[in-house]
Image: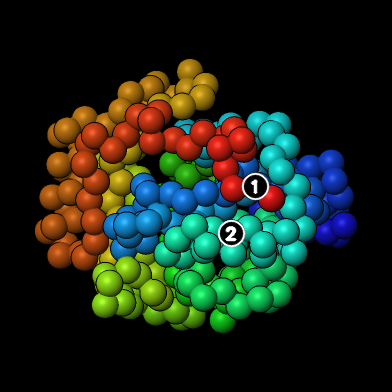
Amino acid sequence: MIAACRLCPRKCGVSRGETGEGLCRSGETMRIARAALHLWEEPPISGKNGSGTVFFTGCTLGCVFCQNGEISRVPFPGQRVTPQELSRIFFQLIAQGAHNINLVTPTHFVPQIRQALLLRRLPVPVVYNTSGYERVETLRALEGLVDIYLPDYKYDGPDLARKLSRAEDYPQTARAAIAEMVRQVGAPVYGEDGLLKRGVFIRHLILPGHTRNSIACLERIKREFPNIPVSLMAQYTPCGDLSAFPELQRPITRREQEKVENALFALDLEGFTQERKSRGTAYIPHWDRRDNTPL
């Protein structure tokens, strides 16, 4: 049992047995929804073969617009795995050609993931793929085990963070977390094959009706993390019950995307932009484990 859990910034103090208490809806045993090669990450991460993604169920943030809500915020048992089984999954993905091992939404299982990574050193980079809502103390437990940090920076002000993720402390919490990630692994380092081997890459998802927030996020990144590239995502797809959030019930417009992209270019930030066609439910993974890596 994880007694009085304080792994994430919520610090809910719940004793996590097997019934999924706490905001993350997770017990002590890791649960995964999918483990498979994934070709839809940024080019230096997906490469030609794909990123070896492991999607963990549950989430510490709970955004109202989450495209993975089926596994992050509603009852979805996933597949229970031990650290030993997770280590075997890593090597199965590597045998399939994975360029890296990509841990998606891993925060609430960091102690167990750490055990898995310590069992046998991986011959490929480890990617920590996160909402950015992290405790520095939890990240420090991963120092030397994670090669690439892939955090979001979703909001630059407390009001929108409270409204859409019930986390008004998100901006300062995410910035402190990103600063720790940069301390650990620094700016991106690429191999001769063009793939990312080490470093931090910040993601930002443009939300409909909230271009001011996006531009404020980019300006903040420029001021505080000028050497860290940005992946500007235009893939927003309305998902779940958004009846209380009418502005989120549509994709972003071309004008909204271009407005934020122009800000990225004006700030001279390195990184990637995303084509408008890279959106829709076709780009959301299927959670039927029959198509995924066997345990």
Give the distance between the C-alpha atoms of the residues marked 1 and 2, in whole angstroms: 9 Å
Image quadrant in which the N terminus is located: bottom right
Q: Earlier in the sequence, mark 1 or mark 2?
A: 2
Q: Secondary structure at mark 2?
A: helix
Of 127 and 178, the residue lying toward us: 127
Instruction: Please determine whether, in this image, residue 44 is positioned above or below residue 186.
Output: above
Tag of residue 275: none
Indicate the amino acid at tag 1: Pro
Q: For residue 99, what is the image quadrant?
A: bottom left
Residue 176's x, y, as percent? 49, 69
In the picture shown, does residue 175 fall above or below 119? above
Q: Residue at x 79, y 52 (%)?
A: 29
Residue name at image x 79 percent, y 42 percent: 20
Q: Is residue 202 left or right of residue 180?
A: left
Q: Position of residue 58 (x, y in %)?
A: 65, 44
In the image shown, does 30 or 14 lie closer to the viewer?
A: 30
Residue 87: where, in percent of width, then height?
67, 64
Q: Residue at x 48, y 18 (%)?
A: 243
> Badge 2 local density, few (<14 within 10 Å), some, or many (20+)?
some
> Which residue appears farthest toward the top when viewing the image?
243
Q: Residue at x 45, y 61 (%)?
A: 97
Relative to 209, 114 lies left or right: right
In the orientation shown, which residue stands out farthest toward the front?
95
Residues at circles 1 and 2 in contact by the CB criterion of under 8 Å: yes
Q: Which quadrant would residue 269 be assigned to in this image?
A: bottom left
| Numbered badge on residue 294 | 1
Using the image, tell me which numbered label, if any, was put on residue 92: 2
